Image: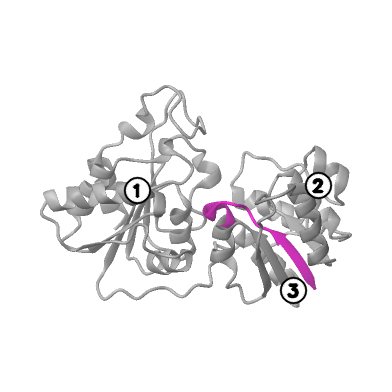
Amino acid sequence: MKILIILPNWLGDALMATPAIEALSAYYPDARFTFVGSYVSIEALKYHPKCEKAIIDNTKNGGNRFINTYKLARELGEFHLAVSFRDQLHATLLLRWTNTVICCARGSWHSKFLLSHAPNIVTQQHLVLQYLQIATCNLNNKPLDTEPLKLYIPTHQFSKPTLGINAGATYGSAKRWYPERFAQVAAEFSDRYDIVIFGGPNEVEMASDIESELKRLHVNNYTNLAGKTSISELCAYIGGCSLFITNDSGPMHVAAAYQVPTVAIFGPTRYKETSQWKNEKSIIVRHEMDCSPCMKRECPLKHHNCMKDISANEVIEAVKTLL
């Protein structure tokens, strides 16, 4: 059973698609997956035991994207089933141009016109459930078990209990709590945990701010890994943590996949749709605001109160409750 999966672009979204992928894997025991997606999503999910091919989508890099998409589709060939988790015209065309008969994607003007299955998906529910409905819409709504998030990258084994700190959020500054407050929380528990600071290549400066604040607080048992890990290494290190404190971000969902106890700080995003999925040891810290969820990359009102009003003590108390 050859199945084509167009993965979401963002790391967190790709992870929230894994229960849908696992549902297809269980329904079709002989499934052989071909994953197409961004570099980040491919690097995280290519280790799936039923992944036959993992292809980075470079169709927008150079030349005409429509022509590039057509060429990629012809290279991929026909599948028994094709599913797109991207609500995007080029992804719909990629499915269509493979000549696959059964193609599933979220309902839109292009998917309804070009694909065999394009259900209208209710957005007032967790993204995991939305992806599951897309992936299984050709199964006549057969009820399937919704599993936790799943990664097949082995975890790193730290020598001591470890607290992971993730102050970044790729989507934008509105989702980011403040480095000095992350440091204050880490310092509070530094007698029980070694500290690892995580961050992507664009978050090195933020991680350095945390490091500087930890030094000021006379905390020395930390490691700064910001900008120093591959995607697979990032997942492995987060999976090895004993505790994780994070913004709403891709790494937050990595922690959920490994069932790492997590305190997640939410500001402008829809926490009911993108919170950790089925991580029983997870607490959300957020403040209800008249202006939230605005879903903006930067605070449109310039005050950022949804994050600014969350104190370090509030997060410390959440950690204590979790522990």
Q: Pick out the residue farthest to the front.
A: 63
User: Does residue 140 appear anywhere in the picture?
Assistant: no
- Does residue 269 appear left or right of residue 158 in this picture? right
The x, y position of residue 249, in whole percent, is: 45, 49
Q: Which of the image's four quarters has the N terminus?
A: bottom right
Q: Which one is closest to the eye, mark 1 or mark 2?
A: 1
Asked if residue 294 lies left or right of residue 36, the reply is left
Between the residue at mark 3 and the residue at mark 2, the CA separation in whole angstroms equals 22 Å
Judge left or right: residue 147 versus residue 229.
right
Q: Nearer the viewer, residue 298 or 23?
A: 298
The coloring applied to the image is one colour
Residue 184 image position (x, y, % from top left):
20, 47
Q: Which residue is mark 2?
A: 118
Q: CA distance from mark 1 to mark 3?
A: 38 Å
- Establish if 290 lies above or below 308: above
The answer to whether 62 is drawn above or below residue 19 in the figure is above
Quarter of the image containing the C terminus?
A: bottom left
Which region shows up in magenta? 1-14
Judging by the rendered image, the residue that carries numbered circle 1 is: 167
Q: Are marks 1 and 3 in contact (CB under 8 Å)?
A: no
Q: Which residue is mark 3?
A: 31
Q: Is residue 234 magenta?
A: no
Q: Amino acid at mark 2?
A: Ala
Residue at horizontal 44%, vertical 31%?
298
Q: CA distance from mark 1 to mark 2?
A: 37 Å
**Label 3 environment density (alpha carbons within 10 Å; few <14, some 14–19, many ≥20):** some
Mark 3 residue element: loop
Q: Earlier in the sequence, mark 1 or mark 3?
A: 3
